[in-house]
Image (cartoon, grey):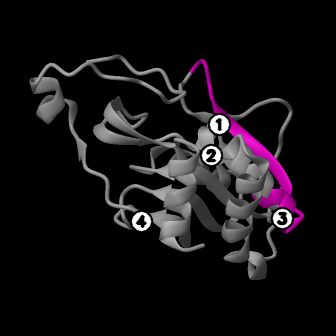
Amino acid sequence: MEQNDILEIFEKTQGLLEGHFLLSSGMHSLQYFQCARVLQYPQYAEELADDIASHFTNKDVDLVISPAMGGLIIGHEVARDLKARFVFTERSSDSGEMALRRGFDLEEGEKALVVEDVLTTGGSVREVLKLLQKENVEVVGAGFIVDRSSGKVKFSTPKYAILELPVVVYQPEECPLCEKGIPIDRPGSRKKKLI
């Protein structure tokens, strides 16, 4: 897909929000990619998944794994496209770290593709990669709908994002929107303290 094509989809579905947002990374931003608004339309989920999957078809992927919540729909669709098994991680109520639950397990030597909706700092994906390494699962890559870092966030595995877009983010203590007293919105799934 071309960059303009995906931006058009986000515009049609009102998936690119403008305002003052608290990201799951803890950073603040003027823009927020609400992929759930895009993925509510199965035809767009299928198109986006096909694009991501096409970059990993030669990797013999056995397993697609996604961090909950954002990666669930797109991860499942990519797994369907690759005819692979799909599992997801969730934050442990004890440690707050990504963990497998619901009876999911990993098999040593499986080839795994990590799929997430939006990449900002890569924190959740790094946790998933750490989990896979601990279980001796071979990671063949990581796929995203949107890379907000515009390629700056790197992993020890090949990475592909349909849309790479530099989006300005601020540390909470340096946020000009906070200085102006603009109310902050928290549209993501992870609970963070509002500053």
Q: Which disc is residue 68 wearing?
A: 1
Mark 4 surroundings: few (<14), some (14-19) or many (≥20) residues within 10 A: few
Looking at the rendered image, the disc whose residue lies closer to the viewer, 2 or 3, is 2
Mark 3 surroundings: few (<14), some (14-19) or many (≥20) residues within 10 A: some
Q: Amino acid at mark 2?
A: Val
Does the magenta-highlighted stretch encompass residue 36? no
Quick one: quadrant of the N terminus? bottom right
Q: Is residue 13 visible?
A: yes
Gap in Å between the C-alphas at discs 1 and 2?
17 Å
The mark nearer the N terminus, 2 or 3, is 2
Does the magenta-highlighted stretch encompass residue 85? yes
Gap in Å between the C-alphas at discs 4 and 2?
25 Å
> At x 66% / y 67%, what residue is drawn?
52
Residue 34 placement (x, y as % from top left):
52, 40
- Against 174, residue 153 (above or below) is below
Q: Which residue is mark 4?
A: 154
Magenta region, residue range: 78-94
Q: Is residue 11 left or right of residue 115?
A: left
Mark 2 surroundings: few (<14), some (14-19) or many (≥20) residues within 10 A: many
Is 37 or 101 nearer to us in this picture? Answer: 37
Q: Secondary structure at mark 2?
A: helix
> At x 20% / y 22%, what residue is drawn?
182
Residue 146 placement (x, y as % from top left):
50, 57
